[in-house]
Amino acid sequence: MMTILKSLEYLEEQRARITNQMAALGDLRCGSISSTTGRCGKPNCHCHQPNDPGHGPNPRLTYKVNGKTVTVSLPNQSATRKAEREIAEFRKLQGLHKEFVEINAKICQIRPAEPDLLLPEEKKLRKRSTRKSHAK
């Protein structure tokens, strides 16, 4: 029994450590960054010349909101680096969440069940039914 309590105490410490790490996370967001290239709609633009690579790469942040994909253009390197940091923090949160759930499952498995404590009124015997049986 003492080993179980030490193990339970250790797991609870691990859970508290993970909770503290989650609380210390910075700004975060889900999503991914990709780049697009392409040609614009202006026929006289350089992008329509033969062997021209076109415009880009243009970084974009893509994420979901209520099941719909949202794409936002990232206007400069600073915005791209900011989005990369926020996505990295979100990935940390995902890892910590997985670890948190696994540790909680272990705690639930080894924590002893509480004895049922019935109140005096709950201990009273139930009255038997006075209805007659219709069985023949």
Image (cartoon, rainbow, N blue to C red):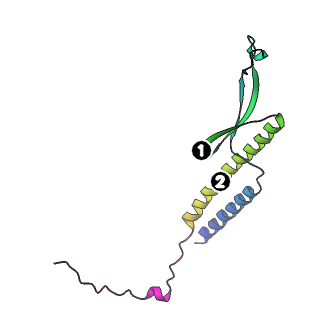
Membership of 122 in magenta stretch: yes
In the image, 103 versus 40, the foreground residue is 40
Image quadrant for the N terminus?
bottom right
Residue 69 position by quadrant: top right
Locate residue 57, reporting x and y percent. Answer: 75, 26
Residue found farthest to the right: 78
In the image, 59 versus 93, the foreground residue is 59
* Pointer 1 or 2: first along the chain: 1
- Asked if 40 appears above or below 127 in the picture, the reply is above
Membership of 74 in magenta stretch: no
Q: Could you classify mark 2 by the number of other residues whose Cα lies within 10 Å: few (under 14), some (14-19), or many (20 or more)?
A: some
- Asked if 29 appears above or below 46 in the picture, the reply is below
Chief secondary structure of the magenta span?
loop
Residue found farthest to the top: 50
Going by the numbered disc 2, the residue's amino acid type is His
Name the residue beneath numbered marker 2: 97
Residue positioned 24% across, 84% down in the render: 132
Residue positioned 56% across, 64% down in the render: 108
Q: Nearer the viewer, mark 1 or mark 2?
A: 1
Q: Which mark is residue 3?
A: none
Q: Which mark is residue 67?
A: 1
Residue positioned 68% across, 53% down in the render: 96
Q: Could you classify mark 1 by the number of other residues whose Cα lies within 10 Å: few (under 14), some (14-19), or many (20 or more)?
A: few
Bounds of the magenta segment: 111-136
Locate residue 78, reporting x and y percent. Answer: 83, 37
In the image, 112 versus 69, the foreground residue is 69
